[in-house]
Amino acid sequence: MTISALVVDDEPVARRAIVRLLRDDPDMAVLGECGDGASAVRAIREQSPDLVFLDIQMPAMNGIDVVATIGATRMPTTVFVTAFEQYAVRAFEANAVDYLVKPFSRERFAEALRRVKARVATRGDDSGIQKVLDALKGRTDYLERVPVRTDDHIIFVDVADIVWIKATRNTVQVHLVDRAYDMRETLTGLAERLDPRQFARIHRSAIINIRRVQTIQPWFNGHHVVTMDTGQKLRMSRYQHEAFLRLVSARGER
């Protein structure tokens, strides 16, 4: 049985990576690629793919908007693609469709395809997509304060006072304006509990408070340098730049 697939992502590098992996699987047939939500809606309606790899964060019309336009019950089997673990965790908890976090490994992609094939083979009901969308939109239980140890006692730091967070092996370093604290926590684990509307992961080893950003300047090879209001300069991965700008823009419209 051949499964037809559509790849939707505004980042050409990400699209090519998915297409290349799909073409390695004899059970998969790539119908096409879309770089924005509007073209994705047209392609889904006209080509009726069995499967869609759908980026959540895209300009103008994002992945959630695509599903809302098509209708959750009429969507093909969907694998959400995201650069932000916060969104992916909610999809996972909903236990409805699979997800991929950029950058993903060949093994993780193969696991997603196994789930897709099982879903398509049983003609499973994809109404669970709506559960994922509700989960992505509805989470409000984010941290307001984080506990950090100093000397022989624990103090609580308001997340609004955090400038940025650095990963150091299996711990993180929480940076405030004038000091830093160590926490026994992974960056991914902490990211899952921070509001993605206020904090953005700009690099594998760094999360920033978007309210504390002063400037973003081009660097090289698609990377950027973010200057915080404390003067700290941090490197932004090229994979995170557009998604980060959309987050900042969304905050400005609130």
Image: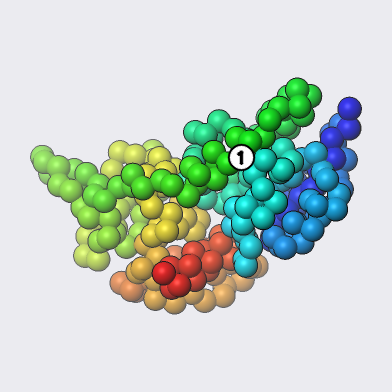
In what element is the residue under mark 1? Answer: helix
Q: How many marks are shown on the rendered structure? A: 1
Residue 107 in the image, given as x and y percentages of width and height: 68, 32
Instruction: Decide which of 113, 78 is in the foreground and name it.
Output: 78
Answer with the quarter of the image where residue 110 lies: top right
Q: Is residue 84 above or below residue 202?
A: above
Q: Is residue 53 visible?
A: yes
Residue 238 in the image, given as x and y percentages of width and height: 60, 62
Residue 30 in the image, given as x and y percentages of width and height: 86, 45
Q: Residue at x 70, y 51 (%)?
A: 70
Please give left or right for residue 56 compared with residue 196 in the image.
right
Residue extending furthest toward the left: 152
Amino acid type, label 1: Ile
Q: Is residue 240 above or below residue 218?
A: above
- Quarter of the N terminus within the rendering: top right
Please give left or right for residue 189 compared with residue 89 in the image.
left
The residue that disc 1 covers is: 129
Q: Residue at x 72, y 38 (%)?
A: 77
Instruction: Decide which of 225, 61 is in the foreground and name it.
Output: 61
Q: Residue at x 52, y 50 (%)?
A: 84
Residue 224 in the image, given as x and y percentages of width and height: 54, 69
* Colour pattern of the rendering: rainbow
Q: Residue at x 38, y 60 (%)?
A: 198
Q: Is residue 206 visible?
A: no
Instruction: Decide which of 85, 40 is in the foreground and name it.
Output: 40
